[in-house]
Image: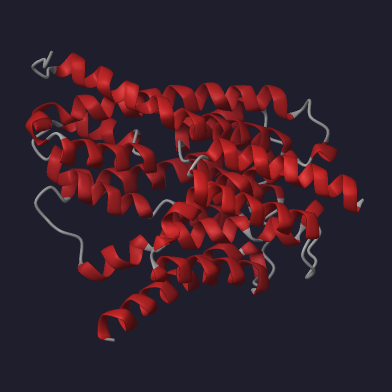
Amino acid sequence: MRQVPNARSEFTTGARAFVPLSMSIIPFGVVCGAAASTAGMTPLQALAMSWVIFAGSAQIAATQLFAGGAPLLVILATGAIVNLRFLMYGASLAQHFRSLGRRWQVTIAYLLTDQAYALTVVHSTQHPERQDHLHWFYLGLAGATWASWQLATIAGILLGSLVPPSWSLDFIVPLTFIAMVVPLLGDRAMSLAAAAGGLASVLLVLPLKLNLIGAALIGVAVGLSAEKLRVEA
Amino acid sequence: MSTVGSGPTGDLLVWSMIIGIGAATFVIRLAPIALLAHLELPRWLKQALRYVPPAVMAAIIAPPLFFAGGEPTMSPDLPRVAAATLAALIAWRTRSTLWTVVVGMLALWGLQAVLG
């Protein structure tokens, strides 16, 4: 039964790896589309967020800041800080994709998400013999993620305006993030970073909607300190 | 201090925001893949970046539990805090976004109906 891995089979394997992820990505995309559209963006703008930015957390943060009347510079800085984590993913993927041409690197970079990164690393650890076709696995997985994200955004744009506010569907945003953050909390330093970020976001009173940036920096500082104390203890 | 309103507004603001964040995000995504093929990020930066997701996500989760309806208040919105706590337990047990969202929403609606 064992087939020799080739580009097409790895692409299919990658696309199939998306199926369980779709349960989290599709609802999140619907939320992003609905939030952008209820914040007052045109359908074209709401959809452009999903294919130009293609990063749910930054899209939600930017949408909320836009709805709250934050200045452009704060929105841009917040979006960039929320996405800084991609530096870490890219640095880790770079060793796998260093021999690829520029066009592949640009495609891989554009499609990079938390999920594509995590599953690609898992796949490459489990199947070191398929290393030569890892970029095809990535393309199948990240391509399926991209297409579903766009369709989910469209669904959100269409549905967002139909649902009355009394249904409290905005609550799906924190719920989606709870589902993403809870699995990270196995480690004490990570839990402390989350606790500090959450507390600071509520208690900090910063001008110009700088709260998210301030809270993120405090959370990172607390996480690092906790790690340092643990190492020294 | 207050520069709000002096920047672009309306359509121009939205497009500047989309293109600006999109461009910054693309550079952040591409730079390490294109440039770091043989280099390593400094250790302190790698360590710091690990804590960005939990800190940012918690900072996105917390305010809507207090600021229901968009109005800043210092008192927690009881149904929302209770529903979020239940959702966190479900997330811990099931690791499923779908179940977390479904149980959290049902809990919120139930609590809102009961507590008015």
Q: Residue furthest right?
A: B116
x and y, in percent, of residue A118 in the image: 31, 43
Placement of A140 over or under B53, stated as above or below = above
Residue at 49 percent across and 54 percent down: it is A182
Between B49 and A120, the one nearer to me in the picture: A120
Q: Is residue A112 left or right of residue A167?
A: left
Q: Residue A138: x and y, percent? A: 26, 30
Spot occupied by residue B45 in the image (x, y as percentages of width and height): 28, 66
Viewer-proximal residue, A35 or B63? B63
Q: How many marks?
A: 0
Image-quadrant location for residue A186: bottom left
Q: Residue at x 37, y 54 (%)?
A: A85
Residue B5 seen in render: no
In the image, what residue occupies the spot 65% across and 53% down? B86
B11 sits to left or right of A113: right
Residue A40 relative to residue A193: left or right: right
User: Quick one: quadrant of the N terminus of chain A?
Assistant: top left
Q: Provide residue A71's location: percent of width, then percent of height.
A: 63, 56
- Is B23 or A81 nearer to us in this picture? A81
Residue A57 located left or right of residue A208? left
Q: Quadrant of residue B65?
A: bottom right
Work out which quarter of the rendered image holds the C terminus of chain A and state it: bottom left
Residue under the image location 37 percent in, 39 percent down: A115
**A116 or A183, which lies in front?**
A183
Q: Residue furthest bottom?
A: A233
- Residue B75 lies, with reference to residue A168, above or below; the image says below
Colour scheme of the rendered structure: secondary structure
Vertical relation: A98 (above or below) B88: above
> Residue A125: in sight, yes or no?
yes
